[in-house]
């Protein structure tokens, strides 16, 4: 069997992920989309997710995919070496993820409150 390995391309928001996925598919590059946490359900229920989306491509297509990302002025973060620039980028990503984490928690609370209010309306 062929050893098919995925390589993490980039982690972005919902709209950017849709744009990148369309670009890669137009260039015959298969993309695997992974939603963080509750994001997949949120996309189904509300049509939008406050969580980040991770995009994966095969190792064979990774170089071509990075070049296409550069054409969009979206850079993927390469964590292969420990330079100061990469460490700063990692901190920025963690900060963005923490913000999206809190937004996601707020989205969960809003959904739960909405469901509870609808349940109360049905009972009374």
Image (spheres, rainbow, N blue to C red):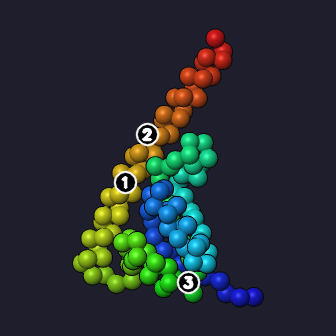
41 to 68, vertically: above or below? above
Marking on residue 98: 1
Q: Quadrant of the N terminus?
A: bottom right
Sequence order check, earlier mark of 2 and 3: 3
Q: What residue sits 35% from the left and 62% below the top? A: 94
Is the C-beta separation of discs 2 and 3 under 8 Å? no
SS for callout 1 = helix
Residue carrying label 3: 61
Q: CA distance from mark 2 to mark 1?
A: 13 Å
Q: What residue sits 45% from the left and 46% below the top? A: 104
Which of the pair 67/62 is nearer the observer? 67
19 to 122, vertically: above or below? below
Sequence order check, earlier mark of 2 and 1: 1
Q: CA distance from mark 2 to mark 3?
A: 37 Å
Where does residue 90 sit, x and y in percent of width and height? 33, 69
Circle nearer the viewer, 2 or 3:
3
Q: What residue sits 52% from the left and 29% below the top? A: 113
Residue 42 horizontal side relative to residue 10, left or right: right
Where does residue 11 sit, x and y in percent of width and height? 45, 66
SS for callout 3 = helix
Q: What residue sits 39% from the left and 83% below the top? A: 80
Residue carrying label 2: 106
């Amino acid at each position: 069997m062929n050893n098919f390995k995925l390589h993490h391309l980039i982690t972005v928001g919902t709209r950017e992920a849709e744009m990148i996925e369309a670009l890669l598919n137009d260039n015959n590059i298969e993309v695997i989309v992974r939603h963080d946490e509750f994001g997949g359900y949120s996309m189904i229920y509300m049509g939008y997710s406050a969580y980040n989306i991770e995009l994966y491509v095969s190792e064979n297509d990774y170089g071509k995919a990075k070049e296409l990302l550069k054409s969009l002025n979206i850079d993927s973060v390469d964590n292969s070496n420990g330079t100061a620039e990469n460490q700063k980028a990692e901190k920025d990503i963690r900060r963005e993820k923490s913000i999206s984490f809190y937004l996601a928690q707020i989205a969960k609370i809003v959904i739960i409150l909405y469901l509870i209010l609808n349940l109360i309306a049905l009972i009374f």
